[in-house]
Amino acid sequence: MSAQQKHAFSRLFYRTAFLWRTRLEEHLRFWSMNLTSWQILWFLHLEDVRYNQYMLAAKLGIETSHLVRLLDRMEKRGLLKREANPQDRRQNHVIITPSGTALVGEIEAVIIRLRQEMLVNIAADDLEDGIHLLEGMLGNLVQMSDAEQSSRSVEARPLSAPSFLGKYSQGIERRSSADRRGGIDRRSNADRRRGGTVEQYAGNLDRRSHVERRSPMERRGKVERRRRVSSR
């Protein structure tokens, strides 16, 4: 298959799926439904599995918070109900009601008619080939999704404690040595601006520390001697 054929197929596939979804949404609007709420009723009606909210959200591929809002509206209409799980009170089973089952029958009749209109003049062999083609595409997409999830889980794996602490201590050492070098450079630049050198700056520090080590009595005695000398 050439690149031009692949592009044409992708464009037609997207366009067909978009128009099919749009047609369904237009007809579901008559019952104040959308495609997601219809799928909820269809899954609950078709399968014998007792879904809780988390399982149903995963089945539909939507967030649990979004599902809860849909279930609230549908429960107010009497289309389904939620029952507490006797084994786990934190979970609720979602169960379709007789009113919801009756609505599924009405909507399904309309969807069957739309599907027949879409597949008119399509040969059975072509339809079978299309089924095999879509199955292959779906399998490839599932493998891609699984590979991406596994790679993300590996990337999100936290560092072990020794390596993390080692990198953290190395970072502290690098920062502290850089800070020390920066402090010396800043002091030497200040001395140069004052006309001194680093050695003079160190000597000033030594003299200051020597003066600070003298006792108050010694400092006062030295001041008084200076006063007597000056008075003479």
Image: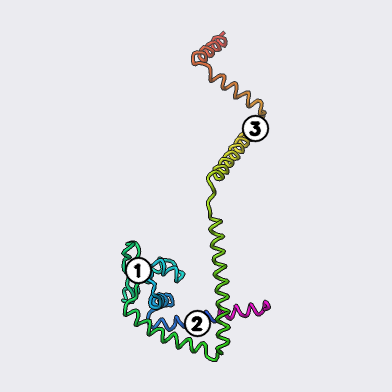
Marks 1/3: CA–CA distance: 75 Å
Which residue sits furthest bottom?
121
Q: Is residue 5 magenta?
A: yes
Name the side, left or right, on which 230 lies relative to 112: right
Q: Amino acid at mark 2?
A: Trp
Range shown magenta:
1-15
* Residue 11 image position (x, y, % from top left): 59, 79
Nearer the camera: disc 2 or disc 1: 1
Nearer the camera: disc 1 or disc 3: 1
Q: Is residue 90 above or below residue 176?
A: below
Residue count near mark 3 (Cα–Cα under 10 Å), binned few <14, some 14–19, many ≥20: some
For the residues bearing labels 1 and 3, Cβ distance under 8 angstroms: no
Q: Which residue is mark 2?
A: 20
The quadrant where residue 5 appears = bottom right
* SS for callout 3: helix
- At horizontal 58% and vertical 44% (from top left) the residue drawn is 167
Residue count near mark 1 (Cα–Cα under 10 Å), binned few <14, some 14–19, many ≥20: some
Marks 2/1: CA–CA distance: 31 Å
Nearer the camera: disc 3 or disc 2: 2
Marks 3/2: CA–CA distance: 77 Å
Does the magenta stretch mainly form a helix, a strand or a loop?
helix
Q: Is residue 141 above or below residue 228?
A: below
Q: Quadrant of the C terminus?
A: top right
Q: Which residue is mark 3?
A: 188
Q: Amino acid at mark 1?
A: His
Q: Which mark is residue 93?
A: 1
Of the image marks 3 and 2, the number of the one nearer the N terminus: 2
